[in-house]
Image (cartoon, grey):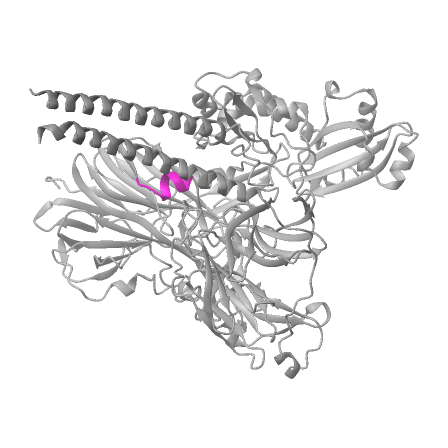
């Protein structure tokens, strides 16, 4: 090797070492700077939604004792849970005694003869800014106390000024939709709920104790609740991890006594949430995890890809069982909601009508009857055209009677169960024998009785080139063209339809309509089945509203049935059940009601109606 | 040739060094820009401001209907679809033509110096056949003829299933005879792709455009120093921003003025109420049809924003409307 070559190699080696070292140093220092700044200012937000039933919290001693006290109080004909003497000085105790006998102060504690849950929240020496002129004048020389009471049912705070010396109530002000500072007892309950929440333990990685909590987000007087549902009393106990410069915020709903949501956030001002509402946390979580990307579920031999759509609810795609393709896509694209009323002759169709923010469609029928209603699209809570929105994320649960699992998604109008608001569940049941069921559940409440619900289910199996058959008499009749059929209601034929692979008829599924045999209190599907040839523009992507809510002789799918051949084709099944709701006492169906319970709080009762066909794999011996 | 090898090696090393240093300075450059932006975002220049008399005139067609009293432009859809004019005692009478329903629903409006009403579309409650198409047009209710028509279309505005909104806000500048019009159509959950167009009213030409900001409300203020600003309520957060109005259109620098106290609220209406005082109306907004279509008023909140021109900061308080 010549001298020049040796020198060149040396220059290259040393030069590259210097340049490489410089680049590495710059990279690590800039990386450190970025990660330092991101730690303090931009800790990635992580949202945790509750995965456990409310009963998890009902057994916490503090909660249990509180609810028992409430029930005892209500049974004694009283509605205001007083403050414990440990939270009061002598004069405050006198003020509480005066107020609990004062009719004006207690005026809002009854509704339709039922006592409503109220808590005395705090009684402190009165401050001048809370007083009117008259009170201020008296309180210059007298000992005055200011008390705050909260009505959990009406979400109202009542503030009173009491002249303790003269034992007189000087002033009473009510603030609807406003919440006060909470009592020490409720603070301890909120802490107990946060400490016992399985989600909190899991996130922190250890069993937290009270010393780990700061109550940074307890409201100042009359500020908004941190819960998105501002009619609930909520607080946000916080678990700060100063070393990591992050905190876990647990949003506790004290109206429902449960964890509403939790969130990891940075401690720096830029990311500490001024308000971390349950609903906005849910929306962000749902958008990030289920609207913007597919999720894969592998369970009991099933491989399922699922996502939330803009207006077609929960969609499952590319489903296989033990390696064999089963479903290309299945979803509920719409719920048609129609109500029957008398008085078609007097119907004014010249102006547009809206009920609870929805445009109402009117269709005249026979015998002076008319139908009115709307189409409900379900979907993502943000950036969508849906009005019935995904709550919480999709959940995987075991089937109630075993033998498989379900993938389910709850959709609600934000104001459900108020009148003309709806709640639907999109559910897919997967059985261990390879069967599956597409299920729609309606949980009311709607606008009243005489409601007819029609969920429009779109099911595209993945059998390659397919053939469709219906059972006629004693034999299977192959459909050569697109068509419509009223699904038999009586269940005399277990499987009135089947869809098979054209080249191998043993590979396919029988269709078992629901006529109440699935032990879910269903009154049957009463469905119409549409069989169409696949076209991308016919529902493969998000469908806008399909057809009319109220033309009962049409489900909207008819537009896709136009005599095309379906022999050895990619077939799409449209299954449209018809459900009539029932509001009669004792036989409620597709209905929800809100009642004041023996604890003075509102309780929601639901009578769901469940519809949808089951697909059973064809075995060689059948 | 062999003698040149050490020189070539040295050159290679120098080139590699230049490349690395250059890469590094590019990265540094980015952070400088970022810092500059941050600085600009905090740098409020607005001086004291006050309510100014608008140049907007009443629509001429009111005369032919013999309406002399105050008129309220009603887009709530309660009395009729599209646009209605309320007048008379307690605004109980209303003027409406079925022809004013032909382009769907409207979210906001402005009036010009000739009494024309310009209407910004809005998807309302449910998606109908032409809903998405309607969102790309600015509409005019002609001052003389009372005819509702398309004033101009924005071809780059495309409302869709995943974001049904198109044009979203408007402000009219009397001095320059220009409109400031915002669109939020192509914004996604992750990215603000909205625009603010500056449009010359007479020529109907877009003369300037701001990209990457979703404005839900727009209004113009002029401070005591004569500087003029476009105030913009954001559809993505709870803040009010400003852009300085220039000869050519708008300055590209956006300055954050304030946040409303409730993080889930978005500013939908901005009004200069009195000296250094703004009145803000907010809504929950999620780029879907739900809250924005709720006409009960329950989800609307109202705030007063008092400006301290010395401290260059706003104090925001909630009020009952």
Above or below, B149 against A268 in this view is: below
| Residue A133 at x, y percent in the picture | 88, 41
Let me know if residue B305 is in the magenta part. no
Residue at the extreme bottom of the image, as rendered: B64
Instruction: Give the answer, above or below, for where A68 lies relative to B227.
Output: above
Quarter of the image with the N terminus of chain A is top left
Q: Which region of the structure is painted magenta?
A: A286-294
Q: Depth check: B288 or B49 in front?
A: B49
| B137, above or below B242, in the image | below
Residue B283 in percent (x, y) is at 57, 51
Vertical relation: B294 (above or below) A438:
below
Q: Is residue A36 left or right of residue B177?
A: left
**From where the camera sits, is residue A59 visible?**
no
In this rendering, does residue A433 appear at all?
yes
Image quadrant where one finds the C terminus of chain A: top left
Residue A415: % across, % down: 53, 47
Nearest to the observer: residue A10 or residue A84:
A10
Rendered residue at 61%/54% (across/down): B297
Farthest-out residue, right: A141
Measured as percent of width and height from the top left, residue B62 is found at 64, 79
Pick the front one: B178 or A305: B178
* Magenta stretch, main secondary structure class: helix
* Horizontal relation, residue A569 to residue B159: left or right: left
x 11%, y 39%: residue = A621
Quadrant in the picture for residue A64: top right
């Amino acid at each position: 090797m010549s001298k020049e070559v040796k020198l060149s190699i040396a220059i290259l080696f040393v030069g590259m070492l210097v340049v490489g070292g410089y680049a590495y140093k710059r990279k690590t220092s800039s990386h450190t700077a970025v990660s330092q700044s991101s730690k303090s200012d931009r800790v990635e937000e992580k949202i945790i939604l509750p995965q456990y039933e409310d009963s998890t919290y009902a057994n916490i001693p503090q909660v249990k004792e509180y609810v028992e006290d409430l029930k005892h109080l209500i049974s004694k004909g009283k509605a205001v849970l007083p403050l414990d003497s440990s939270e009061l000085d002598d004069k405050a105790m006198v003020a509480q005694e005066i107020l609990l006998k004062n009719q004006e102060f207690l005026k809002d504690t009854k509704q339709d003869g039922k006592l409503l849950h109220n808590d005395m929240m705090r009684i402190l020496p009165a401050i001048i800014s809370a007083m009117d002129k008259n009170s201020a004048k008296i309180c210059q020389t007298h000992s005055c106390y200011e008390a705050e009471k909260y009505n959990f049912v009406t979400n109202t705070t009542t503030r009173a000024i009491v002249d303790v010396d003269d034992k007189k109530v000087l002033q009473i002000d009510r603030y609807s939709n406003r919440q006060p500072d909470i009592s020490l007892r409720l603070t301890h309950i909120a802490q107990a709920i946060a400490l016992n929440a399985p989600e909190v333990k899991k996130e922190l990685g250890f069993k937290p104790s009270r010393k780990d909590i700061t109550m940074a987000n307890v409201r100042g007087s009359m500020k908004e609740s941190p819960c998105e549902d501002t009619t609930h009393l909520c607080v946000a106990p916080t678990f700060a991890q100063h070393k990591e410069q992050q905190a876990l915020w647990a949003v506790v709903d004290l109206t429902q006594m449960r964890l509403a949501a939790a969130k990891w956030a940075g401690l720096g001002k830029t990311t500490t949430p001024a308000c971390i509402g349950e609903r906005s946390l849910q929306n962000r979580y749902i958008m990030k995890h289920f609207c913007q990307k597919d999720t894969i579920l592998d369970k009991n031999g099933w491989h399922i890809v699922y996502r939330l759509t803009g207006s077609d609810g929960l969609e499952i795609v590319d489903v296989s069982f033990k390696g064999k393709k089963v479903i290309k896509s299945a979803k509920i694209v719409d719920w048609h909601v129609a109500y029957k009323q008398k008085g078609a002759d007097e119907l004014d169709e010249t102006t547009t009508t809206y009920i609870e923010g929805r445009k109402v469609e009117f269709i005249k029928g026979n015998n002076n009857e008319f139908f009115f209603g709307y189409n409900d699209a379900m979907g993502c809570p943000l950036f969508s055209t849906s009005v019935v929105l995904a709550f919480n994320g999709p959940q995987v649960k075991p089937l109630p009677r075993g033998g498989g699992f379900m993938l389910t998604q709850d959709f609600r109008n934000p104001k459900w169960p108020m009148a003309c608001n709806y709640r639907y569940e999109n559910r897919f049941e997967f059985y261990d024998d390879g069967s599956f069921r597409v299920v729609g559940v309606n949980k009311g409440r709607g606008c009243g009785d005489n409601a007819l619900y029609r969920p429009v289910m779109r099911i595209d199996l993945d059998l390659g080139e397919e053939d469709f058959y219906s059972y006629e008499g004693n034999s299977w009749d192959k459909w050569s063209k697109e068509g419509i059929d009223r699904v038999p209601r009586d269940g005399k034929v277990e499987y009135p339809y089947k869809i098979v692979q054209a080249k191998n008829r043993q590979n396919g599924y029988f269709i078992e309509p629901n006529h109440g045999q699935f032990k879910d209190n269903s009154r049957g599907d009463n469905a119409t089945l549409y069989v169409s040839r696949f076209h991308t523009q016919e529902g493969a992507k998000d469908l806008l509203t399909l057809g009319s809510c109220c033309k009962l002789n049409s489900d909207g799918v008819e537009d896709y049935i136009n005599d095309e051949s379906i022999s050895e084709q990619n077939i799409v099944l449209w299954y449209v059940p018809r459900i009539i709701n029932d509001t009669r006492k004792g036989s409620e169906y597709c209905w929800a009601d809100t009642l004041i319970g023996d604890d003075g709080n509102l309780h929601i009762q639901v009578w769901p109606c469940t519809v949808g066909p089951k697909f059973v794999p064809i075995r060689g011996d059948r | 040739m062999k003698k040149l090898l050490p020189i070539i090696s040295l050159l290679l090393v120098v080139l590699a060094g230049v490349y690395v240093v250059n890469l590094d300075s590019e990265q540094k450059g980015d952070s400088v820009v970022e810092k500059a932006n941050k600085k600009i975002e905090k740098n409020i220049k607005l001086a004291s401001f006050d309510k100014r008399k608008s140049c907007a005139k009443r629509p001429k067609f009111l005369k032919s209907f013999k309406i002399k009293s105050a008129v309220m432009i009603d887009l709530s859809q309660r009395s009729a679809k599209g646009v209605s004019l309320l007048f008379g005692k307690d605004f109980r009478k209303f003027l409406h033509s079925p022809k004013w329903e032909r382009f769907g629903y409207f979210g906001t409006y402005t009036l010009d110096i000739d009494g024309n009403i310009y209407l910004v579309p809005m998807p309302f409650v449910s998606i109908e056949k032409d809903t998405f198409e309607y969102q790309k047009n600015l509409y005019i209710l002609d001052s003389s003829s009372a005819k509702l028509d398309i004033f101009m279309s924005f071809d780059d505005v495309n409302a869709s299933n995943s974001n049904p909104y198109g044009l979203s806000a408007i402000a009219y500048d009397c001095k320059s005879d220009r409109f400031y019009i915002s669109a939020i159509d192509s914004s996604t959950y992750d990215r603000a792709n909205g625009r603010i167009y500056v449009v010359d009213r007479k020529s109907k030409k877009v003369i300037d455009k701001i990209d990457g900001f979703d404005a839900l409300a727009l209004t113009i203020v002029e401070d005591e120093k004569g500087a003029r600003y476009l105030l913009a309520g954001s559809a993505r957060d709870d803040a009010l921003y400003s852009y300085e109005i220039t000869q050519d259109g708008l300055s590209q620098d956006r300055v954050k003025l304030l946040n409303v106290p409730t993080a889930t609220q978005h500013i939908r209406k901005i009004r200069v109420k009195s000296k250094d005082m703004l009145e803000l109306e907010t809504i929950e907004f999620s780029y879907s049809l739900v809250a924005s279509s709720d006409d009960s008023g329950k989800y609307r909140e109202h705030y007063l924003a008092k400006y301290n021109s010395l401290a260059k900061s706003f104090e925001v308080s909630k009020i009952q409307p």
